[in-house]
Image: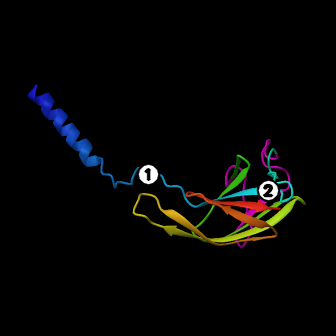
Amino acid sequence: MKKLIFIVFISLSLVQCNSDENDCSLVLCIGPEFVFEFIDAETGENVLEGVFDNGAPEGFIITIGEDNTPLTFEQEYVFNAGRVGVAGFIGQNQVQVSYDTIFDVAIALDIETQSDGGCCPGYLYENITVTNAAFERVENETALILRIFI
């Protein structure tokens, strides 16, 4: 019985030693992300609603960077709940989004890392410009959300 109590005591001690609140080794952090919503400026309707029902529509293109590298649907960008989500990079970001003759916008922004002492950093999105459309920023703590009016 003493051996059992000793084993339980040692086991609990080891659990407590390994449960350090500042141990971030098992935490998976999400990188910076920006999300776009394309809204018809006259009607207020989401231009892409229903368009992605069968995958990325023909003529919808997202490129990133100065070299205009095209992104692949469901690998490098996603469509969810009427919004297009793209992973960002620390530093300057340039994104071109076009859909046939409906819209063609260029988005530029800077992303900086902010540390609050937690396991995962936060991100600061600055110097946001959208060419060929008006936009508003929707507040969100984990991603930059832009509502773009076309």
Residue placed most toward the observer, 61 or 103: 103
**Observer-nearest of 41 and 90:** 41
Q: Residue furthest top?
A: 1
Asked which quadrant contains residue 89, the reply is bottom right
Mark 1 nearby-residue class (10 Å; few <14, some 14–19, many ≥20): few
| Spot occupied by residue 101 in the image (x, y as percentages of width and height) | 90, 60
Q: Is residue 99 left or right of residue 142?
A: right
Tell me the quarter of the picture where residue 141 sits: bottom right
- Left or right: 25, with 107 as reference point: left
Residue drawn at the location 17% of the way across and 36% of the way down: 9
Q: Which residue is mark 1?
A: 27
Q: Residue at x 80, y 51 (%)?
A: 48
Residue range highlighted in magenta: 51-77
Answer whether residue 69 is visible to the viewer in this image. Answer: no
Label disc, if present, on residue 39 of the rendered structure: 2
Q: Position of residue 17 (x, y in %)?
A: 24, 48
Disc number placed over residue 139 in the picture, else none = none
Q: Residue 123, located in which quarter of the rendered image?
A: bottom right
